[in-house]
Structures are given as C-alpha cells and as structure tokens.
Amino acid sequence: MKQYIMGNEAMAKGALEAGVKVVTGYPGTPATEIVDYCLPGEQVYVEWSANEKVALEMAMGASLCNMRSMAVMKHNGTNFATDFIMHLNFTGVRGGMVLVSADDPGANSSQNEEDTRILIHTYGHLPLFDPATPAEAKDMIKEAFALSEKTGSCYVLRPVMRICHSRAIIEDGAKEDLVQTPDFQSDRSRFVMSAVSEPKAGGLMRPMWRHRLLNEKQAEFTRYAEESRFNSVEEGEGRTGLVGCGIGYTCIKEAEALLNRKFPVLKLGTLPLPRKKVISFLRDLDVAIVFEEVEPVVERMLKQICYEEGLAVKILGREDYLPAEGELTPETVIEALRKQGLVEGGKTAVSAPQISAPVRTRTQCVGCPHRGLLSALKQVARKKKAVVTGDIGCYDAGSFPPIELQSTIFCMGSSIPMASGIAKTGIDRPVMAIIGDSTFFHNGLLGLVNAVNNRSNITVILCDNSTTAMTGFQPHPGSGTNIYNEQTTAISPEKIGEALGIKTRVVNPYLMEETKAAVTEALEEEGVSLVISRAPCFLLSSRRGEKEIFPRRPVKMDPEKCNGCKVCLNDLGCPALHYVAGEKKVYVDFNNCVSCGLCADICRRGALSV
Amino acid sequence: MNLNIIICGVGGQGNLLASVAIANYAMKKGFNVVGTETIGAAQRGGSVVSHLRISDGPIYASTVPDGTADILLGFEPVEALRHIKKLNPEGIYIINVEKVPTVLCNMGLDQYPDLEQIMAALQDVSSHGYAINAAEKARELGGAIMTNVVLLGALSSVSDFFDRDEFIEVLKKIISPKVLEKNLKAFEEGRALIAS
C-alpha cells in the first residue's frame, strides 16, 4: 500500500518491518511521532521512558537478550544519553540496535541547534546514516538493523527536522521473517565495563582493550559504507563538485532543477565515509562544496582525505564558505554556486514587502492552568524581588513578554540546581525554580535531592498538569498511566517532598490568591520548599471531554470602568484580551474566552468582572 | 506539470488537514507529492506553514523555494505577509481576511498592519489574488473550525488542476461522517466566494 505520510511514520514503519521488538524514547520535537507510530505494531513493546538515557539503556537491555531494539530521541536527549553511548560503543550489542537521534537545524522547536553526528560518530565512533528523504530514512532503518547484527555494533539514524516533518508517498514493505526468542548469556569481558586487567587481551586494562576493538571495527564500518547504496556519484559538467550529505543532497538536486544544470554530485548517506568513492570523486575536481546539516563534519573529513592523498582540491562548506548556522535550502546551493561564478547574474531578489509581519511569541492556551500560576508567581516575585530560574515545557513561555518571569532556560532539569547555585552565593534575594512535572521526572528530581542534601535555600514550583503537554500529551511517571493507557502508580511529588523532609504545599492555580499566599510563605521559609501547582492540562482535558477543571465564570466587560492600565495584559497576558489603542481600553474576545474568570480576579477597576 | 503550494496560518486553524487533503487529491490523480510543515509550538498560537509540492516528475526538496509558490493559501493575513517571498509573480494568492492578532499586538506593544497594506504588498508580487472572509462564512455554517474547508473550496476553483467532484471524493475519505455534510457545504461556499 502507498500512503502520503510523515517522515516519522515512515521511520516507524521501517522499524516495524525490520521486526523491532522493543521501542523506547522520550518525547521531543522533531522525533516524537516515531515512537507513537510504533505503538500499533504487533508483538512490539513500546514505552515512553522517563528520559533518553533510560530509553537507551532499556533498548540495550533488550539487545542483550538478542532482540531488535530502537531508542528514539531528539538531539538534547542524545546529549543526555552520551555517557551511555560512550560505553555501548565499546561493548557493542547483541540483537540489532538502532538509535534514532533527530536534529533540528534552524532550531524551529528546540532550545539549541547542534549536530549529533559529532557526538555519535566523531566522538563515539559509531556508524551512522544521514537520510535525504523520508523514504530513504525508512530504508536506512532496515539496513541499520541488519548491519547492527552483522557488525555487533549499535547503528544510528540521524534524521533532521525536514525528514521527520516532511511528508511523502511511502510504500509499505514486507515484514522481515525473523524468529526472535529472548536469550540472555553472560559475557562479562564484554558487558562489564570496568577498570580491570583483561586476561583475553594479555592483561591489558579492559577499557583500553575494548577501545582498541572499537578502533579496529572502523575498517568494517567503512567497508559497508563503501558498498552502501546510500552513497553514490553522479556525473556532471565542470570541475566544481557538489557533495550532498543527507538532506543536503535534495537541496543540490533542487538547485540543479531550478538552474537547469548538472554538476558532478557525490551523494553521501553514511558515516564513516566511503573513502574510496570519495577519493575517486574528488580526483577530477578543482573545488568541492559540501552541503551538510549543520556543522562542517564531512567537510573536515574531506579536507583530511585530500591532505592524506595529496589531492589539490579546494574543499568548501559550512566552516567558512556557507552559512555556519541554520537549515540548508536549495537557495543556499544556488548562492554558493553564484559565489563561485558558476551561476550568472545577481541574486534573484524577491522584493521584500514594505511592511513587516509582527512576530508571534508562544503563549499558554486560553484557559491553561499555567496562566493563573505564572500570574501569581509574577506578582509575588515582583514584590519579593525574587530571582526565578526556568525549565522546559509549556510554562516556559512565562519567560516571554508579557509575563517575563523566568530569567533562565537551559536544558531539562537545570532550573533547580541553577537556583541552588544562585542561592549559595549568599545573594540577598529569594530564589525560585519553575519546573514542569514531566521535566521533573526526566532530570529534575536529582536537582531537588541535591538541594536538600546541601541545604539550599530555594523554592521549587512544580507545574503539575499530569502530562507532557508541549510535545502532544505523552504520559510520564507522575501521570498514573503509560503509553498503553494502562493504570499505573502515579508517582506523587508531594510524597517525594515528604520523603525529602521538605515543606510541601499543593495549590490550585485557578485560585490566584491562595497560590500567591502559598508561594509567599514558601519564599519566606529557610531551606528547600516545594509548591506543587496542580490542575490537568486544559487543552487535553477539554479534548477528552473530561470533568471541568475549573468552574466556568463568564466575564462581563464594562468599558466605562476600564482606565487602560493594562494590568490584565501585563500580569495575565491572556490571548482572549486585547487592547484598543484608540480608546485606551481592554476588550474581551468572546470567541476565544473560555470563562476561567482569572482576568476578573486581576482587574483592579471592576471593568472585568464575573 | 509542477505545482507548488504554500499554506500558512496559525496553530489550530486546520492548516494540516488542508495540506493532507490536497496531497491526497494529487495522489489520486497519479502525481508525486512531497510536503513539509514548520510547526514550532503550533497549539499555542504559533505560526504554522505547510509546503506542498506536486509534480509528474521527481521532487527533491520538501520546501518550496522562494518565488516559486503557484498558490499561496493564507489562513491569516499576517501569516500570508510573512511568507510573501515564496509567491511566484505569476502565482495566485487566496487570503482569509480575518485577523488573528499576535500576543504583542493584543497588548498594544506591536502594530498589526492594516489589511489594505497587506493586500498591497501581495499585489506588488502578483496581480492574481483573492481576499475572502472564510472564517465568517465558516461560522455562519456552524463553526470557525470549517474555515480550512471553505478555503479548500476557494482553492479548488482557482486552478485547473482541481476537479470539484474528485476533490469532494477525497474530502469524503478524510472528514468524519458526522460532520461531512456541513463541511461539503463549506467547500461549496468557498467556491462561491471566489465566483462572486
């Protein structure tokens, strides 16, 4: 069957056709749906793990039992799982194992922009596939499972956002006829990574021996790369060649079509590189331009090959010729050719419009429980001159105008240790960390434990909406459910607070006065305090038609009483409110208002009332 | 035959369903289709843009190159303005004129451009376009949620590529039977908005 589907679904199909038995991951754009789409697979175990390191370790456990497994994550997760990668590269795997590490060039949905090929291949020495299209990503996953078993190594697929979030017509393939029976055999010289002398290697320290084996493996990886159908050469005119890695290849092909030209092209889809193929391509060229996402990884490898082979080819790419940041586009290729004098004329400028489009900053949904909480926190923080650290989730939009509450956002779980660090300087201001529930279970808990053990003086605000809302409502250890909708123990943050011996309060964020009072008390206390703001995600509970999470309080607007002070906009920032500059008054957009009534609680003039 | 389409709007407007409907129509006609979306945090008021590329030959990049969109379907005026550089000078634009103000515009901290200015900017690029109030029409028919189908109706009548009856067959497959009748009405009203 042929279907028009998303790249993430194509990758899930590839894994299922390869007979994957265990799929794990932590949600993160652009990779999330790969896990979701594995769910209906027959005889596959799928889970949302607490974090990406746990997901990768789970997959390794399955591989040790000779079963095919896959761990799925976005680049930040790969960073987080790197310690484990730096061991599984030494040990190798048993059952075929694939790590999907999705990058987000252009950082459309990420806190940072990076290239995990460096972590996986340059640093971890693992073999990797870099797909050019969703269909190729599907084929590569299947190939990765096969090669993983042939080489006894974990293979990695590195799709970029434009693979994950592209859609194409994808054909179903046959499911591999594999008989997999779980079987565990202890092999301690391999799977016990420890600083011991290894008799099998003449008494060498085991880590050094395994390092040597990994280095020796590279020749085998290169041999498979040399034979791979994902690397190919296309002939063309002239002595300037274009090298397209992954999605870079499609940009080159598009540029060729737009220009109606044909250049010599080297399409690359693997790391390590097919060295012989690369040398034979470079031999007839004066210049080669490398298009890759997003760091100059292959570019530097080609420079090294040219040096070693004595080839006088000028290698250009993202190091200092192409833009060093952001997504590649066909226009990037055309511009590079223009700079080489290979495309006539100036830039075909599309005239910029005279007016600019106002930016859309992210905010909470109308009716969201985070809005009441963020407003209460802003009011208390202003009064107490608190320093506020933030974390990753829907509530992080509280760092943007108009709320501008959190002063920091780094990576998952950073809010609490950063707050502790700020407090430990002895600064004469209270310190508050804001973290969501999924993020708390991902990597926030340790920061809290550390803060307690080291007697930090901080207040931790846990925004508990029982789901991982930002990425599409995945369950987490505090949700009381899992990917199969089974009832599980909802791990209670207040019981964690109790176990840690810290003062813990639970508030309803729709009751702003109560929330403000609880946070104020917490800030005045010595030591670590925990305030749990609890209300289910409004969007999710509305979609599911669940019991109303707040009493509906229809808002009335009296323009006579509005003096245009904008407190409702600055301290609440609800998208259903708007300011009419000509009248200097705020109005309610009743098409959008869901009657949470918070604006009436915040209006000091009685212009907004319930 | 090559047809590049840009559909731009704000999260929650049904942009994605529109692009899937067009893609399925093209597939049914035997064409190759590739698309992509830039979604960011679409559910929370962010910009959403879908690129759709249809061809009887191979298609490489999933994004529509600048200046090559044959059709720009703007679910929201400012979003159309944001992607104006995609429009081919020979291309057609269809804009739903109902504004979705940004958070900062709501607060009076940013200026939402006048609709006339936006239309003028579009006309500077291409002289073929339509401004319709699809959202108002959808509400008349029972819900703003059908704005996307009104716009699909409009789209289906501006290009020879689309056949009304065959497009309706595609909609029947992807829209829930419970709301199909209203949506087919919305589709026809979209066509009528262009005809008038």
Image (cartoon, coloured by chain):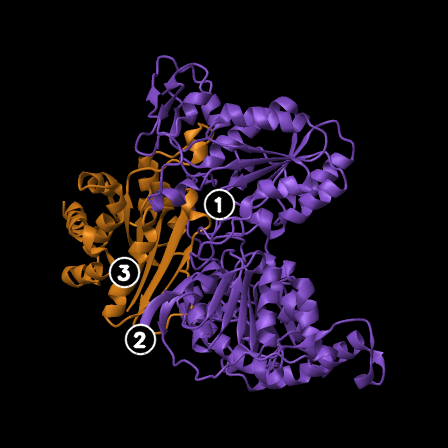
Chain colours: A purple, B orange
The residue singled out by tag 3 in the image is B22
Q: Which residue is drawn at 46% across and 40% down?
A: A359
Q: How many marks?
A: 3
Question: Same subunit under labels 2 and 1?
Answer: yes
Task: Report x, y in % for residue A16.
Answer: 44, 74
Of helix, strand and loop, which one carries label 1?
loop
Task: Report x, y in % for residue A250.
Answer: 46, 69
The residue singled out by tag 1 in the image is A466
User: Chain ID for label 1?
Assistant: A
User: Chain ID for label 2?
Assistant: A
The residue singled out by tag 2 in the image is A1
Q: Tell me whether circle 2 and circle 1 mark residues in contact (CB < 8 Å).
A: no
Task: Report x, y in % for residue B148.
Answer: 27, 49
Q: Real-space Cα distance between discs 1 and 3?
A: 36 Å
Q: Which of A97 and A568 is in front in this view?
A: A97
Comparing marks 2 and 1, which lies closer to the viewer?
A: 1
Which quadrant: the N terminus of chain B?
A: bottom left
Up the image or down, A433 lies above or below A129; here it is above
Up the image or down, A362 lies above or below A57; here it is above
Q: How crowded is mark 2: few (under 14 residues within 10 Å), some or many (20 or more)?
A: few
Q: Tell me whether circle 2 and circle 3 mark residues in contact (CB < 8 Å).
A: no
Q: Real-space Cα distance between discs 2 and 1?
A: 38 Å
